[in-house]
Image (spheres, rainbow, N blue to C red):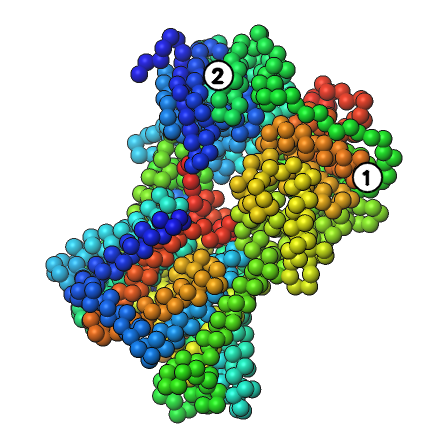
Amino acid sequence: MGDAAGFLQLTLVKAAPLIFAALAGVVCERAGILNIALEGGLTVGAFAAVAMSYATGSPLAGVAAGILAGAMLAGLLGIAATRFNVDQIVAGTGLNLLAAGGTAFGVAVIFGAPGASPEVHALGPRGEAILIAVALALAAVLQLGLDRTPWGLRLRACGENPRAVLSAGLDPRRIRIVATLMGGGLAGLGGVFLSLGELDLYSDGMTAGRGFIALAAVIFGRWTPLSACGTAVAFGALSALQFVLQRSGVPSELMQALPYVAALAALTGIAGRARAPAADGVPFDAG
Amino acid sequence: MRASSGATLEARGIVKRFGSVLAVDGVDLALEPGEIHALCGENGAGKSTLARIAAGILAPTAGEVVARGAVGLVHQHFELVDRLRVWENVVLGREPRRGLRLDASAARERVRSLGAAYGLDVDPDAVVETLPVGVAQRVEILRELARDPATLVLDEPTAVLAPAEIDALFATLRALAARGTSIAVITHKLAEVVAHADRVTVMRSGRVVLRAATGDTSIEAIAHAMVGADIPALAQRVEVAARPAFAARGLCAGDGAHALRDVSFAVGRGEIVGIAGVEGNGQSALTDAIAGMSTYEGELVLDGQPLRGTPAARIAAGVRVIPQDRRREALVLPWSIAENAALGDHARAPLRRGWTIDRSARDALATQIVDRFDVRAPSIRTPLAALSGGNQQKVVVGRALGHAPALLVAYQPTRGIDVGAAALVQSRLIEARNGGAAVLLISFELDEVQALADRILVLYRGAVAAEFVRGHFDRARIGALMAGAA
Amino acid sequence: MSRAQRWILGGLLVAVAAGVIALAGASPLAGFAALVRGALGGERQISETLVQTTALLFPALAVAFAFRAGLFNIGAEGQLIVGGLFAGVAGSALPGPGFVTIPLILAAGAAGGGAWGAIAGALRARFGGSEVIATLMLNIVAALLANYLVAGPLHPAGVAGAETAPLPVSSWLPVLLPGTRLTIALVIALALAAGLAFVFARTVFGYTLRAAGEAPQAAARAGIDLRRTALVAMSLSGAIAGLGGATLVAGVLHRFNVALSPGYGFIAIAVALVGGLDPVRIVAAAFAFGILQSGSLSMQALAHVPKDAVAFVEGLAIVGLSARRIAASAARAD
């Protein structure tokens, strides 16, 4: 029996939304925006994808809708952070709540009471595989992009010292907003995978804290795309393991808690003290 | 819009308001090619704001800037990305490309050739945060030169340089000017102005009060224009029988470029020991060690007892520190003068009564500080953020001296404050010394150290290079030691 | 944020709320009317609003307490759940008269929440780990832990759902208004608010907390131990939230189950912000949000507007209010 292959496949399926969300977190934070609304991004992405697929019958339209929804949610954060210099943690918390409430509202209004959508046209196994490949490829592309391109240099500079970017004649606010939109789109894509890839419907709370696991992956992965992706895959493996052990008597909640406990352990510095981008989450007043 | 005559940069009728504060109030300025133009004024006179407007980084509330060619600005507090490399900082925004990618080798070559052309040598691959301050400044200058500017503005460039490095910098600027660049230097060091600049413009309270060719004016005239009055004299020193009070033995702290290496010295009661040195030679490590804010090896002794433990323990032992950065390290800006007055003594009688803070005692202390230190504020309920830098510093100093400390460490006590407030602070330090306190003065301004200290210790690369006694302050020798001469 | 800005934000939120209600197919006026009537339309309705107010007041005070000390406690929800869990276990196990058991139950809740908050506090104090991440993670671990315990090891025989055994009636919190769910929990919460106001304004402890929150470097140089402050503040904050969980168990549900809180810990963040982190104004804010909570249910029943519309607007309110700089120390503690 292709046990190992089956396990690997399950790992990647579980990891894909985490990879997208973690990459979203990396892009935002390297630019200096602390985005804790990855959970919200996954949620609105998952919901919008299903709603669009329900309306048009086309899963591809759903993908586009999911990306757009994620980008819009994160865009709120980007504008709030760059134009109004808000506290990004608080704003992110608000966005998570907004996303949860808004999608539950949408489900009730569009689909009626039961808290879930009916089945819709989904991506199917081939679409799933393509998205997984996209996730892995994006990790590599973003790593190269950050390290080797002018765009990456400017983004990294924004995350460390936006004043320096301003002195260099660039606009750090614009760079940050673009990064946030990108990140939001990535998170939305992660949500799309959840609702149209792994399954073929949306239900309230289906993101189940994955956005927060992704945050842990960002830290464990020291804010670099490849490491964050690798950590996300490891968390996916934990998830797959839980599935496999389901019938062995190990309480499922214990397994489910593992990624979160791992993140707590990361805070003790076991994974080495990496430093976040210096201007991460710090409001920047251009004056 | 064309610049009239041959001026490289013309600012006309510049006004800048920040909320209700009028920083620049109708200023005209013209910079000619090939000249070095000094812009002088007290802190808060509007010089840095004007510079940023001239460089196009800040928009004026009114008025216009007409510039021929690019304008480069080297900031007082560098705006470099510490974690990136030198070449990444220099080409940021003007990156050489190869297709979609950064052309790193072209960038490195850029840094090397610029450095060679202007005598500013830096390793392109060095990470900025590992560089000593003087070298980091070169990176900032290179970054601006990479824009091939017709005008180059430098904001307090010599604040972090040793005397020898200052000469090298002005030689570089002279070479640049000879190629036709207009150079504007913002500085409060009048000796430099008279020695190196062609023309000088003095600002006060946002307006221009003096324009002259440096050959036609003098240091006294410039200083008078800056302040608008005569500078108050310092307090008199009195003869004090010095007794041993504080000693550091074999102090080693920190690592890397800013560490402290096996430092030993003593400060007696009734004397001011001045630590002279360029920024970044261990002064912060020394202050933090004495304050208990960092770990270190070696021992500290105060009044015969070992000085160790937490910052709270040291405060209880009679150590008071005036930190370098009052806004972040000494004050709670949103709080009132009264609330700030209690900080440091809040956990002890008389300010503490059981579980609560004795508000009348606290208010009495605050009133005392305001009266004795001439703090200009509407009341003790005024938030610190509403006070000028000079008045904020007076609160810090007044609080530190409020309980007759055994050892007072004053780290850059007159940084960024107006001349009047600086003179008051310096006088109070002398009076504390007269009253028997042991005062350790750490300052990057050699003039200040020379004016106040009974003994000067020169700190270079974390070690004490030499000691000088009052009456034998050899300024040239001290300057050379600050720069690392043997 | 200025007065004018607050009014603009308020107007914006009302407009969005109206739009959302319209999206649900109801008239905004009907929706608002249903909400207000459901919240304040009679003695029973007002008492229910006050129950919601109390449920929000505890975690809001907890969040504000931590915020004032410069710590982002996003984990009030988890601390509330753990506190409720401890209270539920203690309550179903302790025999005796109410005046003995009730204080013990409440203390158990505070201890549980306090321990949960202390985990994040210790991670911050000892390792400098971000309490934002820690509390976020701990929220989820708390839910999982509670799920596991009440469905498994702690599951009492003869009880149907995933919950603890019911508390004996003698251990129920005394009711303030007969026939309603309004208990002395409200009084406890109000007393707590007054106590916290006093702590912040007059005590040395409150002074050190505020200094640590507003100017951590200056506080450290003035002899304040930032690590100890972080640990104590997070523990106390968790204890306050846990106490709230205990009052929900002993006063409203009379048992612990995993559906204890419909997200009070998160809405409490909005309450704390609207109240400007001031205990007295938070009481008023909690009442306003209590109206929203209890009114949302009748808005759903009468005007057929899904109650999640309220959560959506509350989330938007938090985003709008995030313009206030919460703490001088950034969330990342390095």
Residue at image mark 1? B436
Rendered image quadrant of residue B275:
top right
Instruction: Name the quarter where the C terminus of chain B is drawn.
Output: top right
Where disc 1 sits, the SS reads loop
Q: Report the residue at 61% width, 14% height from top.
A: B221
Question: Dot 1 falls on which chain?
Answer: B
Q: State the residue lying farthest toward the front.
A: B378
| Residue type indicated by callout 1 | Gly
Q: Residues within 10 Å of mark 1 (few under 14, many from 20)?
A: many
Q: Is residue A85 left or right of residue B255?
A: left
**Is the residue C252 above or below the residue C328 in the image?**
below
Estimate the x, y position of residue B9 in percent, counting from the top left: 40, 16
Question: Dot 2 falls on which chain?
Answer: B
Any mark on residue B183, and which?
A: 2
Residues at circles 1 and 2 in contact by the CB criterion of under 8 Å? no
Q: Nearer the viewer, residue A144 or B211?
A: B211
Q: Nearer the viewer, residue A133 or A29?
A: A29
